[in-house]
Amino acid sequence: MPGSVQLLVVSPDAPLGQVIHDYATSLGHGVFLAAGLAEARRVITRVRVDLICLDSLLPPADVERFCSVVVSPDGARPFVVFIAPSSMKLVPSALPACFRPDRYGVVTKPLDIDELEREMARLLAADRPREAALLHAGSIALDGSTRQLLFASGGALTLTPTEYRLLRYLMERPGEFVSPDELLEKAWGYPKDTGGAEVVRAHISNVRRKLRSAGQDPQLLRNIPYQGYAISVETRNGGRGGRAGHSK
């Protein structure tokens, strides 16, 4: 398996989770265990996760919703491996609707740890060059391969998956103000006109707190009431600016 990765195992089967934990940690990987999807969501908001192992014992409808929110549609990590009965491989319709061979894998029960390692290695090796490319906006850059925010002055911030998607959406529109509604729909994947602006405010506050702790200007993330949020970029005369747009 390439490099050291962060692995999240989501399973109500504690012995199964422990087997994967012991094996992966013996190889130097970081492993987090969650008994259910709600707990898994809490883990993902706190730490970077490269790959998620999902047990087929979890409710299928909940797994679909979980994957639609957590797995980035733009190709950024995390990848997902389903741990499932052999029938899931034999009957394509048994696979979750969200399944994509380039982003998801399947290993069968009873768990063969060598099969799991091969499937994880296949997915992690599939990272595309475009994911590793840096997205620049002013004096900062976003690294899709490590999910870090890089500063021209040096240093970096490790972002949660949600923070990464939020900043990526804003950095693709440098200086433009994007409404909370649009961020919820495009960065979070919420259906149109659902979710609350307080969700966006909370994550903006978290990123600003990280910026402040790193000695960076928290106002790299600007906001204007009733217009939304923007990445502040340096203008040609050395100041910082933003232009209104995408407001709702």
Image (cartoon, rainbow, N blue to C red):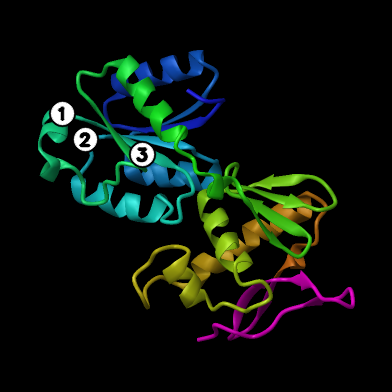
Gap between marks 1 and 2 measured at Cα: 8 Å
Q: Residue at x 45, y 72 (%)?
A: 196
| CA distance for labels 3 and 1 | 16 Å
In the rendered structure, which amino acid carries the disc numbered 2?
Ser
Q: Is residue 244 left or right of residue 33?
A: right
What residue did someone put label 3 on? 80
Question: Which numbered marker is on residue 148?
Answer: none
**Separation of residues labelled 3 and 2 (CA atoms):** 12 Å
- x and y, in percent, of residue 22 in the image: 43, 15
Q: Tag 1 or tag 3, which sits nearer the N-term? A: 3
Of circles 3 and 2, which is in front? 3
The image quarter in which residue 12 lies: top left
User: For residue 203, what is the image quadrant?
Assistant: bottom right
Q: Which residue is mark 2?
A: 56
* Residue 220 lies in the magenta-colored region: no
- Who is closer to the viewer here, 185 or 132? 132
Mark 2 residue element:
loop
Looking at the picture, which amino acid does disc 1 mark? Pro
The amino acid beneath tag 3 is: Val
Classify 10 Å Cα crowding around label 3: few (below 14), some (14-19), many (20 and above). many
**Residue at label 1?**
85
- Residue 207 in percent (x, y) is at 65, 57
235 sits to left or right of 129 = right
Residue 83: x and y in percent read: 26, 30
Q: Residue at x 78, y 49 (%)?
A: 214
Q: Which residues, given as a range, are shown in magenta?
A: 222-248
- Looking at the image, is mark 1 or mark 2 nearer the viewer? 1
Query: Does residue 220 appear to the left or right of 59 in the view shown?
Result: right
